[in-house]
Image: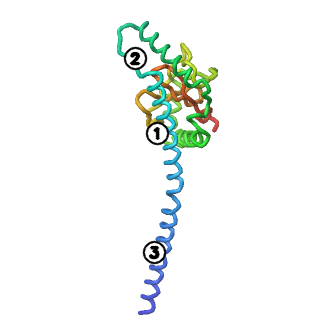
Amino acid sequence: MGHIVFRRSLSGVTARTCMLLLVAGLSLAAPVPSQDNARTVNDFEARVTKYLDLRKKEAGSAPRPTNSPEKLAETQQKLAAKVRALRQDAKQGDIFAPEIAVYFRRQISATVAGPNGQKIRASLRHADPVHTVALHVNQIYPPGLPLQSTPPTLLLNLPPLPRELEYRIVGRNLVLYDTVPNLTVDFVPDAIPSAED
């Protein structure tokens, strides 16, 4: 009888030990991608901060409130010209560097494949998506092009931005948009997976 109890206890200990080792192995393995993600997000945020600091210091901040749309547009155009001169060599990937773009595509794909995926796609379809506009870094956001908002459920899985910057969707591209000078700061091509993906 004692042998039976001993064997049962031993098998229980062995099972528990295996489970603990398995959990320990998982817990040791799991932080690696999250640490990588944290480094990638930190890199992205540092690049965003660098851009915004440069823009504010060298070109200016948001124009003062005015009741004149003409005055506001004129101030915005002057600010945009200064930013474009400051960043005349800017190119796609300066902020969305390759590893950062991979992170964003992965986050967006996972979100679109998740429980809110159909709502996100429906939201994008109903927001007058634009498919034929060629995007360029440092360009004035094209006149007449709708500023398509990013669905809130998608935003929840993207790094937060300073108040003057926004994520916008143009076709399948994710745009980093500066609302003050009305400029495309950078973008991730094909960030939104196609319906066939």
Q: Estimate the x, y position of residue 82 in percent, counting from the top left.
A: 52, 19
Secondary structure category for the residue under label 2: loop
Residue lying at the far front of the rendered structure: 58
Choose top left, top right, bottom left or bottom right for residue 175: top right
On screen, residue 179 above or below 34: above
In the foreground, 109 or 105: 105
Q: Residue at x 43, y 27 (%)?
A: 164
Few, some or many C-alpha atoms within 10 Å of disc 2 (few <14, some 14-19, many ≥20)?
Answer: some
What is the C-alpha distance between the residues marked 2 and 1?
26 Å
- Amino acid under disc 3: Arg
Q: Looking at the image, which is closer to me, 134 or 51?
A: 51
Q: Which residue is mark 2?
A: 63
Indicate the position of residue 38 as horizontal and vertical percent values: 49, 48
Which callout, 3 or 1, points to the residue nearer the camera?
1
| Quadrant of the image containing the N terminus | bottom left
Disc 1 marks which residue? 159
Q: Residue at x 62, y 29 (%)?
A: 91
Q: Secondary structure at mark 1?
A: loop
Q: Which of the two marks, 2 or 1, is nearer to us in this view? A: 2
Camera-side residue: 82 or 24? Answer: 82
- Name the image quarter holding residue 197: top right
Mark 3 or 1, nearer chain start: 3
In this picture, residue 72 sits left or right of residue 89: left
Please, what is the three-letter code of the amino acid marked with disc 2? Pro
Q: Position of residue 183 (x, y in %)?
A: 52, 22
Q: Which residue is mark 3?
A: 16
